[in-house]
Image (cartoon, helix red, strand yellow):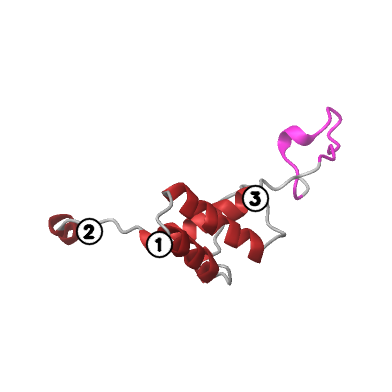
Amino acid sequence: MRKAGTRRHDKRPDGTAIARPRFAEVVWRGSTIDPTRDVAAAAVLAAFEAVRSAGLSLVACYRAGVEAWRRTHPDHSPEYGARQAVAVILAAKVSLPVEQGLAAEI
């Protein structure tokens, strides 16, 4: 009879079990935190709108939003802060039209 946690190929030729560490598989996924509910979301959108109303480029608008996120969360990495700020802006500013026929099928 096998001991719990061992497999048939985890035995020596004499039948004794070989101790092998078992590691859980780690799968990294995107953040499940909704950035639009973060305390920085209002500042990100305000900065985006301020630069947009000044007539500057869209790149400058997004950059202002990212900078607002970084001021609120200086402990976040630049890459993470940029992704979160852009997610806030896209959630607030981008809407995808759905055709009536397609919506009825879903």
* Residue placed under numbered mark 3 in the picture: 78
Residue 84's label in the rendered image is none
Q: Nearer the viewer, mark 2 or mark 1?
A: 1
The alpha-carbon separation of the residues under discs 2 and 3 comes to: 38 Å
Magenta residues, dominant SS class: loop
Name the foreground residue: 81 vs 99: 81
- Residue topped by disc 2: 106
Span of residues in magenta: 4-20
78 in relation to 70, above or below: above
- Disc 3 on helix, strand or loop? helix
The amino acid pointed to by label 1 is Ser
**Residue marked by disc 1:** 53
Q: Could you tell me residue 41's position as x and y percent?
A: 52, 68
Q: Amino acid at mark 3?
A: Pro
**Of marks 3 and 1, which one's residue comes earlier in the chain?**
1
**x and y, in percent, of residue 16 in the image:** 86, 37
Q: Nearer the viewer, mark 2 or mark 3?
A: 3
Residue, far top: 13
Q: Residue at x 60, y 55 (%)?
A: 81
